[in-house]
Amino acid sequence: MIQIKTAHEIELMRASGLVTAGALKAVRAAVRPGVTTGELDAIAEDHIRSAGAVPNFLGYHGFTGTICASINDEVVHGIPNPDRTLAEGDNISIDCGAILQGWHSDSAITVSVGTPSAADVALLEVTERSMWAGLAKAVAGGRLTDISHAVEESITAHEHRYGIVDHYGGHGIGTEMHQDPHVLNYGRQGRGPKLVPGLALAIEPMVTVGDPATVELDDGWTVVTKDGSRAAHFEHSVAITPEGPWVLTAEDGGLAGLAPFGVTPRS
Ligand code: MG
Ligand code: MG
């Protein structure tokens, strides 16, 4: 069932989104060689709880972290660990979410540790841009797979053949973190549910340098690429409003990220 929110409920989701945005900003600022993913997790949890919110990942099906911390060939769902130290040249994807007044938010960034290689710079840029291409299609009157198609087109436009991770994707979000509909990161446009004001979605491309096939590790969580190639993951929660997309987990509501697509977010 797709949950359609009132304008007031979307405002509450925005407040939740800003908590998650702040948590990710604090974690990003702490990423450096020598820091552990356990320390990053604590920074996120402190930020969320100081804002009067609750981490939504913590305890989710038994997950033990506030963030997912996925390094290099780990695609998503890496478990924060006080013994796991970041090194120069690593990439870390940090996925995080909060519940404020019952409303969920969900967002992810991938950050390079120290000075990245040209290949890592490109991987992160391609992945983040594809997320914005999808967010730019979160407009009333469209269909769900317009978003999926835009994400895919953005990734496949590059000379290097990046992989798009199958099966995992975005989702509806609201009074629960994961709601209908599932949002694939590929597909033909013009299909699926109609995009209407009050629909809120998390859009989250997962892109690999090599083959997109993945396996889950024995810890029951961490998803890695089968071929060991590096992956990146970016995510924002967005609401469809009569005035355009409102990127709930972006501090500026999506103003800068949507601009290259000629889309102005709700302000
Ligand atoms: Mg997420
Ligand atoms: Mg998500």
Image (cartoon, rainbow, N blue to C red):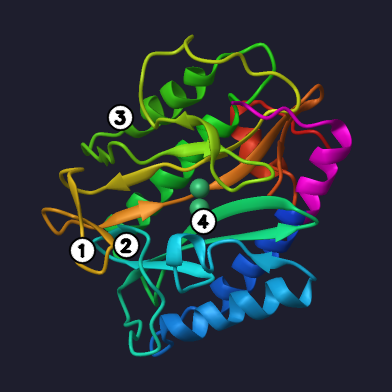
Q: CA–CA distance between discs 4 and 3? A: 21 Å
Tell me what residue is drawn at x 53 percent, y 63 percent. Answer: 57
Residue that mark 3 sits on: 156
- Please, what is the dominant secondary structure of the magenta stretch? helix
Q: Is residue 266 above or below residue 197?
A: below
Tell me what residue is drawn at x 41 percent, y 52 percent. Answer: 233
Say which amino acid is labelled 4.
Ala
Q: Quadrant of residue 127?
A: top left
Nearer-N-terminus badge (1/3): 3
Is the residue indicated by label 1 positioned so its CB lies within 8 Å of ligand 1? Answer: no
Question: Mark 1–mark 3 contact, CB under 8 Å?
Answer: no
In magenta stretch: residue 9: yes
Q: Quadrant of residue 247?
A: top right
Residue that mark 1 sits on: 217
Tell me what residue is drawn at x 54 percent, y 68 percent. Answer: 58
Under tag 2, what secondary structure? loop
In front: label 4 or label 2: 2
Say which amino acid is labelled 3.
Thr
Q: Which residues are magenta?
A: 1-15
Q: Looking at the picture, how far across and down is residue 200, in whole percent?
A: 66, 34
